């Protein structure tokens, strides 16, 4: 019986609404007062049933819930024969509840979309060699699975045979399909857009990367900040306190009406729901845009960050040095380029790659008598000529004369942050190359956005030499730049910044800078959602798109503000209601309930705004990407 | 000890959490410190001693409060 009544709450709400309308219709149009009275009585009785059942269940487990307050109030109103109040209060409470549930589902939609991307079934090879569809929970590590075009990859695993294109947007945020063939790794939750593959399951269920992401987001949306825990504790004692207060009101004033009105007005209403809705909507927005936020504590701390520290390599720059400057001297420059390429092709120095990319078309000669000069470069015999490739020190050592023109060029190249590679053939300097790592496109605008969002200090700590770091810093307008930094220097520097009273966010790739990620007030891992990054950081930017960073900061600020707005609104409503019941005469139970239910809807709608949050001036690129994934 | 994750129908009021939490904690065979009700994901998580209580009994306790259990998974802890 109880269950039937509870499961028909929607119907009961509708019914009680209709009966109330019929009652008023007959009163004001037909002038029949008796019908109104009976209509209100019936509406009260059917309306209070589900509320009273819930109140009873709550009391059984020693919780004084809102249902308890409302039930007592309605019974009280019934007792003093104020059927209008009892009917309307129950109806508003039920209807408000229905709307709450509907709108709450909205705020949770973004995260639900994510969890719905989880695979549900898989084609598993049976002992007979056939493939059979089974529930995802029944797949074990070591099983061999078949994935067909359009299917979701059900596990993290290795391709055994076949090939195809996989869209890994759910893991990396990158929607450009990736080719997979034998021995490639595939990830659960990604989609095989083309082809057929057989996969050996390495990790299943919650152990997969995607499973971990889902768990993280689910835990995050329900994680509680200090403030929330306080509110929780507060509301545990709050409802009994309201009960006590209204009892005192009754004892002192002997006015049942006033006492039960106090009961309804004192309902905590929007207070308990305000913070969770902001939280879930904010985290949901992040999840949709490739920003994983680990809970409301993170949102709070991140929104107060005033210093952001970058680990330069791969974060601000493309991480792939290229020739930015090339000057040739003397006649027959092609020949010199050929010699340079011939020497570099045998080298595994990082700059060699950049040079070879530049000299693609070169003719390669056999190289003899190669001699590596430590801290200088390479000297070798190519096509009968003595070729020296290296820095200024090597040229000195080789006794090569540098003209004024060359000296000027060198000076200029160095001040603009290039690493120099000089090439001399038979004692004459022939080529000067300046090699530089490029700043990522768009990073400059993104850093400006961070400043606009209130970040005062932008710091780069890098292992590169100070000259290179300075160039990047001045190009990007950073406030501090330090080169020659080892991982332990970086964490020491973060500690120093924190001692100065700054709130530090550290952006790194999560692979070799986990101490700094953990030490900073907010650790932000950038790059693909690798296990390490997910575990050690507070915020994960799912792919290496730098523009997610200002979005993330803007989002947490908006979310934190949203929470404060909701708390202020909720507390304000209760105070105003209670004040007006004692100090004015227009307040009654129905108005109180209406205000309460509306304030709950207002905080939910306010939270919902976060789902659509987008940093002003965001680049169009994101828009395009989202259309592609959709 | 075993771990149970119960997926519930959408929870709408935060006091539902408290009810479910208290109800679970009141059951015999439930590890009290492990009970966790997730409001936004509408899930309940708990560790329990399978010799003293079954998953069906846990489900029943929650359903008796008026919150239908959609799906439950049990894992060895």
Image: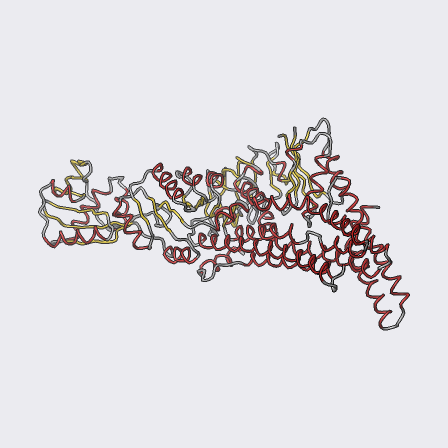
Q: Quadrant of residue A20?
A: bottom right
Seen at 33% across and 55% down, the residue is A477
A251 relative to A625 in the view: left or right:
right
> Measured from the top left, where is residue A107 in percent x and y?
61, 54
Q: In this picture, is A524 found above or below A22? A: above
Q: Residue furthest front?
A: A252
Q: In this picture, is A33 found above or below B4? A: below
> Measured from the top left, where is residue A557 in percent x and y?
50, 54
* A72 or A289, nearer to the observer: A72
* A264 or A143, nearer to the observer: A264
Q: Quadrant of residue A121?
A: top right
* A192 or A420, nearer to the observer: A420
> Measured from the top left, where is residue A211 in percent x and y?
56, 41
A39 relative to A452 in the view: left or right:
right
* A406 or A496, nearer to the observer: A496
Q: How many marks?
A: 0
Here the colouring is secondary structure
Q: In this picture, is A183 found above or below A221? A: above
Q: Quadrant of the C terminus of chain A?
A: bottom right
Q: Residue furthest top?
A: B51
> Measured from the top left, where is residue A508 in percent x and y?
40, 44
Seen at 18% across and 50% down, the residue is A432
């Amino acid at each position: 019986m109880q269950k039937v009544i509870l499961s028909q709450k929607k119907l009961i709400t509708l019914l009680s609404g209709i009966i109330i309308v019929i009652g008023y219709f007959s009163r004001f149009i037909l002038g029949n007062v008796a019908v109104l009275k009976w209509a209100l009585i019936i509406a009260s009785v059917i309306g209070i049933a589900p509320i009273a059942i819930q109140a009873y269940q709550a009391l059984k487990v020693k919780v004084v819930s809102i249902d308890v307050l409302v039930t007592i109030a309605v019974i009280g109103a019934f007792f003093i024969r104020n059927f209008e109040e009892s009917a309307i209060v129950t109806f508003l409470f039920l209807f408000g509840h229905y709307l709450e549930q509907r709108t709450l589902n909205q705020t949770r939609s973004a995260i639900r979309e994510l969890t719905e991307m989880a695979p549900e079934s898989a084609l598993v090879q049976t002992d007979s060699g056939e493939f059979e569809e089974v529930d995802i929970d029944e797949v074990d590590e070591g099983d061999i699975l078949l994935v067909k075009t359009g299917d979701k990859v059900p596990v993290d695993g290795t391709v055994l045979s076949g090939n195809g294109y996989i869209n890994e947007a759910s893991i990396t945020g990158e929607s450009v399909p990736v080719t997979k063939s034998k021995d490639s790794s595939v990830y659960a939750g990604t989609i095989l857009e083309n082809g057929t593959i057989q996969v050996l399951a390495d990790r299943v269920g919650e152990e997969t990367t995607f499973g971990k992401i889902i768990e993280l987001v689910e835990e995050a949306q329900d994680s509680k900040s200090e403030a929330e825990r306080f509110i929780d504790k507060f509301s545990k004692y709050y409802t009994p306190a309201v009960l006590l207060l209204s009892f005192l009101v009754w004892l002192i004033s002997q006015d049942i009406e006033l006492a039960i009105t106090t009961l309804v007005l004192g309902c905590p209403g929007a207070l308990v729901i305000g913070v969770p809705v902001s939280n879930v909507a904010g985290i949901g927005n992040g999840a949709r845009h490739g920003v994983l936020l680990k809970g409301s504590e993170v949102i709070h701390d991140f929104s107060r960050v005033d210093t952001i520290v970058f680990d330069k390599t791969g974060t601000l720059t493309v991480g792939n040095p290229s020739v930015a400057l090339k000057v040739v001297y003397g006649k027959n420059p092609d020949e010199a380029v050929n010699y340079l390429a011939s020497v570099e092709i045998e080298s595994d120095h990082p700059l060699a790659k950049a040079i070879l990319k530049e000299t693609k078309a070169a003719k390669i000669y056999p190289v003899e008598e190669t001699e590596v000069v430590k801290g200088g470069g390479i000297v070798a015999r190519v096509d009968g000529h003595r070729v020296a490739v290296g820095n200024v020190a090597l040229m000195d050592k080789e006794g090569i004369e540098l003209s004024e023109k060359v000296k000027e060029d060198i000076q200029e190249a160095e001040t603009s942050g290039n690493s120099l590679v000089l090439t001399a053939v038979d004692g004459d300097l022939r080529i000067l190359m300046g090699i530089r790592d490029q700043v990522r496109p768009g990073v400059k605008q993104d850093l400006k956005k961070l400043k606009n969002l209130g970040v005062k200090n932008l710091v780069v700590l890098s292992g590169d030499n100070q000259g290179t770091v300075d160039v990047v810093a001045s190009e990007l307008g950073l406030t501090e730049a330090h080169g020659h930094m080892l991982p332990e220097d970086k964490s020491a520097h973060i500690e120093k910044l924190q001692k100065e009273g700054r709130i530090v966010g550290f952006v790194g790739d999560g692979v070799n800078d986990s101490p700094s990620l953990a030490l900073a007030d907010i650790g932000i891992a950038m790059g693909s959602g690798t296990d390490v990054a997910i575990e050690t950081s507070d915020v994960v930017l799912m792919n290496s798109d730098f523009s997610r960073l200002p979005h993330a900061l803007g989002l947490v600020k908006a979310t934190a503000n949203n929470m404060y707005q909701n708390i202020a609104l909720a507390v304000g409503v209760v105070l105003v209601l209670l004040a007006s019941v004692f100090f004015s005469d227009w307040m009654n139970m129905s108005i109180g309930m209406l205000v309460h239910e509306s304030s709950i809807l207002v905080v939910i709608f306010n939270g919902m705004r976060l789902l659509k949050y987008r940093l002003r001036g965001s680049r169009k690129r994101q828009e395009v990407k989202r259309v592609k994934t959709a | 000890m075993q771990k149970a994750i119960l997926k519930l129908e959408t929870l709408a009021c935060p006091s539902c959490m408290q009810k479910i939490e208290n109800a679970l904690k009141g059951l015999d065979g439930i590890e009290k410190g492990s009970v966790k009700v997730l409001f936004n994901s509408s899930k309940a998580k708990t560790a329990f001693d399978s010799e003293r209580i079954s998953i069906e009994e846990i489900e029943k306790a929650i359903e008796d409060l008026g919150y239908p259990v959609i799906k439950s998974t049990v894992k060895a802890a």
